[in-house]
Image: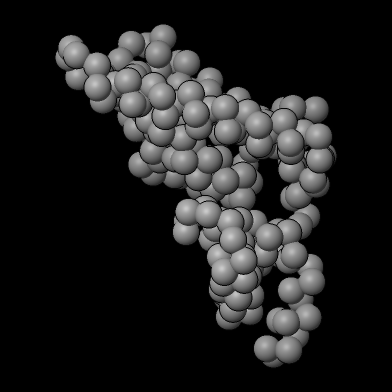
């Protein structure tokens, strides 16, 4: 059984690379020790806890994926500066809200991935995800008016759209109304 799982690793190479990248981010740098340690941990995790097949929902589009990553890094930097300003600026506390955002895609994979991406951006965190309705409930800093709440909702939808265009297959895009 373990040898079959080891053979199946060749189909999970992208996930292993992503796990190693996450490992390096968690340890704060890319060096030989972090890469090798991350690879070892990723292989152990993938062998002991095999993932269900998900490849049927994914199609990597390199250009769109690159644009997605660049925009994600931009969003990270912009929101980090904004949250930093909220922390040091004089004046009253910045308003925040818990908002419900219904996802365009019905896929559990993309619901989870969008929630994780939105949580990684400073100033927002997923409080709850409802699989049955495809809804994320998020706590968002700087959303005190209906216009700011709608802008936050639009940012989440835009993030999901960029993710779907970067790695979603044709059926997922059609289901989400993007094709």
Say whether residue 168 is left or right of residue 81.
right
**Observer able to see residue 98:** yes
The answer to whether residue 118 is above or below residue 43 is: above
As rendered, which of 23 and 110 lies closer to the eye? 23
The answer to whether residue 152 is above or below residue 49 is: above
Measuring from the top left, give residue 169's x and y in whole percent.
79, 43
The answer to whether residue 106 is above or below residue 123 is: below
User: Count of labels shown?
Assistant: 0
Residue under the image location 47 percent in, 59 percent down: 27
Say whether residue 57 is left or right of residue 138.
right
Measuring from the top left, give residue 141's x and y in whole percent.
33, 25
**The N terminus, quarter of image:** bottom right
The answer to whether residue 134 is above or below residue 46 is: above
Q: How is the image coloured?
A: one colour
As rendered, which of 106 and 90 lies closer to the eye? 90
Residue under the image location 34 percent in, 32 percent down: 139
**The C terminus, quarter of image:** top right
- Please tell me in which quadrant of the rendered image residue 147 appears: top left
As rendered, which of 39 and 11 lies closer to the eye? 39
Measuring from the top left, give residue 28's x and y in whole percent.
48, 54
Say whether residue 33 is left or right of residue 164.
left
As rendered, which of 113 and 29 lies closer to the eye? 29
Residue under the image location 53 percent in, 54 percent down: 29
Measuring from the top left, give residue 65's x and y in whole percent.
74, 38
Say whether residue 38 is left or right of residue 151.
right
- Please tell me in which quadrant of the rendered image residue 43 appears: bottom right
- Please tell me in which quadrant of the rendered image residue 63 appears: top right
**Observer able to see residue 175:** no
Residue under the image location 42 percent in, 29 percent down: 80
């Amino acid at each position: 059984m373990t040898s079959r799982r080891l053979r199946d690793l060749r189909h999970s190479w992208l996930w292993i690379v992503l796990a190693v990248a996450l490992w390096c981010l968690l340890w704060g740098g890319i060096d030989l020790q972090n890469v090798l340690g991350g690879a070892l941990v990723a292989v152990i995790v993938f062998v002991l806890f095999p993932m269900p097949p998900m490849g049927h929902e994914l199609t990597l589009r390199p250009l769109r994926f690159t644009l997605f990553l660049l925009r994600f890094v931009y969003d990270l930097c912009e929101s980090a500066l904004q949250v930093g300003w909220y922390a040091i600026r004089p004046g009253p506390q910045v308003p925040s809200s818990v908002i419900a955002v219904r996802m365009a895609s019905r896929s559990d994979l993309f619901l989870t991935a969008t929630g994780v991406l939105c949580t990684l951006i400073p100033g927002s965190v997923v409080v709850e995800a409802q699989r049955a309705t495809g809804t994320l409930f998020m706590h968002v800093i700087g959303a005190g008016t209906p216009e700011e709440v709608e802008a936050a909702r639009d940012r989440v939808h835009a993030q999901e759209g960029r993710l779907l265009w970067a790695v979603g297959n044709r059926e997922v895009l059609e289901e989400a109304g993007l094709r």
